[in-house]
Image (cartoon, rainbow, N blue to C red):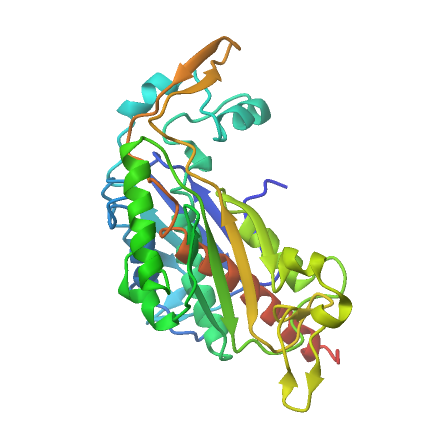
Amino acid sequence: MSGNSIGVVFRVTTWGESHGKALGAVVDGCPPNIDVTEADIQGDLAKRRPGRHSSSSPRQEADRVEILSGTFEGRTTGTPISLLIGNKDPDSTAYEELRDIFRPGHGDFTYARKYGIRDHRGGGRASGREPVARVAAGAIAKKVIARHGIEVCAYTQELGGVAAQDISLAEIAKNPLCCPDPPAARKMEEKLEEARTQGNSLGGIVTILVRGCPPGLGEPVFDKIDADLAKALMSIGTIKGVEIGAGFQAAGMTGSECNDPITPEGFATNHAGGVLAGITNGDEIVIRAACKPIASIEKAQETVDINGKPTSVSIRGRHDVSVIPRIIPVCEAMVAICLADHLLRQQALRATGGT
């Protein structure tokens, strides 16, 4: 009931706080004989670590992962995989002035109300550093789904009101914002610099694509694949909205416009985003996730202290201007974890005689 785990068969539990000694994850239910090394995980962690972009936090964390259990000679054993990532460069001094003050837009207020205690250093469990454990676990999930030809790819669709128009997936790795439209990426960079100099932050939209997913994944009612994908993504602190396929645009369509015609070669269009009745249809899964602006900003904001007394706060410390692009590997990780779980659930169904 603690809400720190996700998944039914492929189950991930994360732990740790932003300024604690370490963060980590336990992956249970991973099949045996999958090639997994620390180097395999490190590649995804490198995409998320701070200090790689001028708009990101200058906190210097190598994010080196250590596999404590669950593998032998570079392969999974089928037993729980324990992952450890140390915190090497926390600086709690800037947070002392926030010990008794609630930051607007952050989890300070709600954590205090829920638990009666909160870790004010970097936001504790509600920090943007918590997802490092998700990325580590997601790298293992990617290994699981890759054996079945499933690939997850995410990119920056929009940032600070600038949207990518001409999508070329080959361009994603060529710019630091992981934007598939180079001219749009340059405008996004300008927006980030403008927000940084103003002591403000920006939100954006991430698109996640799933290719090679077979039809049949997902449960018919409460564990629909699109519902679980949305839950997995919405569990990321910054994400305030998720849509699949046509999403909110479907509300303005007629049935004849929204329905995807079925031909002998497959679906003629993909307004469904690869999901029908909560079950994958074999088409590309298309997901968009809306990310809110970073809550911790230098610009003065009205708030209250722990006694309800009004005050203002200007937040110092080391913070990102936007969660983009560091949120992209986190989105990929959560989608991969969800898919790995449903893939193994489907295999179990077939193994027990389901059709």
The location of residue 167, given as percent across then percent down, is: 42, 68
Q: Residue at x 44, y 39 (%)?
A: 293
Among the 4 quarters of the image, the one containing residue 119: top left
Q: Is residue 84 shown above or below 124?
A: below
| Label tally | 0
The location of residue 57, given as percent across then percent down, is: 28, 40
Q: Residue at x 51, y 70 (%)?
A: 210
Does residue 230 appear in this view?
yes
Q: Nearer the viewer, residue 27 or 300?
A: 300
The location of residue 240, given as percent across then percent down, is: 55, 44
- Image quadrant holding the N terminus, namely top right
Q: Is residue 275 shown above or below 197?
A: below
Q: Residue at x 44, y 24 (%)?
A: 103
Among the 4 quarters of the image, the one containing residue 223: bottom right
- Image quadrant holding the C terminus, namely bottom right
Does residue 82 appear in this view?
no
